[in-house]
Amino acid sequence: MKRISILGSTGSIGTQTLDVLSRCPEQYTVEALSAGTNISLLLEQIRQFRPKLVSVATKELAEKVKAEAPDSVKVLYGQEGLLAVAAGNEAELVVTALVGSQGLKPTLAAIEAGKHIGLANKETLVSAGHLVSEQAKKFGVSLLPIDSEHSAIFQCLNGENRAELSKIILTASGGSFRDRSREELACVTVEQALQHPNWAMGAKITIDSATMANKGLEVIEAHWLFDVSYDQIEVLIHPQSIVHSMVEFVDGSVMAQLGTPDMRVPIQYALTYPRRASFEAEKLNLARIGTLQFREMDEMRYPCIRMAYESGRLGGTAPAVFNAANEVAVARFLKGEIAFLEIEDVIAAVLERHEVLSNPDLHTILEADQWARAAAQSWSL
């Protein structure tokens, strides 16, 4: 049986990962789970999957879980708990499904413990791609992408000569407001922004999809995962979310991975790699779909994608600052503190103030992250 640990078990990716695992109970065992504050769902997961270790956000929540969980379950909290779920157990593969840069330290700890990574936390590679890549090579650890786009690229490259790769083509749905002009975005609400047309995702990533910051983060992640330059990464708007991404080779051939919009498919592929397993999901029917549409990315319409490319090319601490500023800006929008279009303004203002430091160590990255958060939180017109 393959032993699995999940960072972020009560979130969108975490719950879908557990759904995949529940379909093959004879093949997988859940070693450890981390959750934030949703202890009612965590308790349900504990009853069903019987992990040996769980972690929650605070000591108070840990006491509540201890009161209801079986005595065989060890309950921790905070940073210590996250690190234990990541590295302090017998899991062979750790699914990193935490939202935002909080996944960085646990992911590095899991790598150093020799655990393979099912990577759904793109912010880890965005903030510290050079460190994560170096450590993965050092400890012989696989980084198995769970994002549908990066899983698609990973699958297209299987068995191919990487030297023959010409470019990567990431597809983007366009998000909640893909058919609205910038003028129409001035007064959109949180509720409208959270209505993604294709995918069921958490609030943060849904907003990121609407601003295209999510695709910008994926561009930086692809740079590190597949060792390609930013000039070799293209983004196309693809409203149907059927072609999850493509790879173009030097002879002009293009390989694509297609499928219905169901995150459980790339999750399962990361869990079963290098083999494939049967999965009962809606099968793709191209005849019924009829037409697949694509259009160029408009960086004037989506400034976040431009800022992501610029941050990636600058390197150093710039990507971490882009990510941190975006996280705070999205949180402020969700709280009603700023307007939708002001998310872009916050990121731009923070990036403009930042003095980029090259080849940063972990301490420097975390300092830049904290500085960017404070700057984004204090931003006002």
Image (cartoon, rainbow, N blue to C red):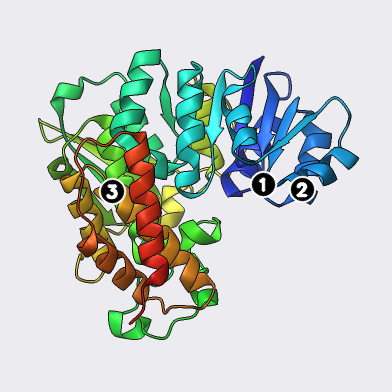
- Crowding at dot 3, Cα within 10 Å, few <14 / some 14-19 / many 20+, comes out as many
> Residue 118, image x and y in percent?
49, 30
Q: Residue at x 41, y 26 (%)?
A: 143
Is 272 placed above or below 345 here? Answer: above
Query: Which residue is identified by label 1?
Result: 57
> Residue 293, image x and y in percent?
30, 59
Query: Which residue is identified by label 3?
Result: 319
The answer to whether the residue labelled 1 contacts the one labelled 2, judged by CB atoms less than 8 Å apart, is yes
Is 234 placed above or below 358 here? Answer: below
Query: Which residue is identified by label 2?
Result: 61
Of 283 and 369, the residue lying toward us = 369
Of 171 and 378, the residue lying toward us = 378
Q: Give the secondary structure at mark 2.
A: helix
Q: Residue at x 26, y 45 (%)?
A: 317
Q: Is residue 367 visible?
A: yes
The answer to whether the residue labelled 3 contacts the one labelled 2, judged by CB atoms less than 8 Å apart, is no
Report how far apart the C-alphas of labels 3 and 1 lie in the structure.
26 Å
Q: Is residue 252 left or right of residue 269?
A: left
Report how far apart the C-alphas of labels 1 and 2 lie in the structure.
7 Å
Report how far apart the C-alphas of labels 3 and 2 lie in the structure.
33 Å
> Residue 224, image x and y in percent?
28, 34
- Crowding at dot 1, Cα within 10 Å, few <14 / some 14-19 / many 20+, comes out as some
Task: Tell me the kind of residue under disc 3.
Answer: Pro
Of 284 and 165, the residue lying toward us = 165
Numbered circles on residues, count:
3
Of 224 and 178, the residue lying toward us = 224
Task: Tell me the kind of residue under disc 2.
Answer: Leu
Q: Give the secondary structure at mark 3.
A: helix
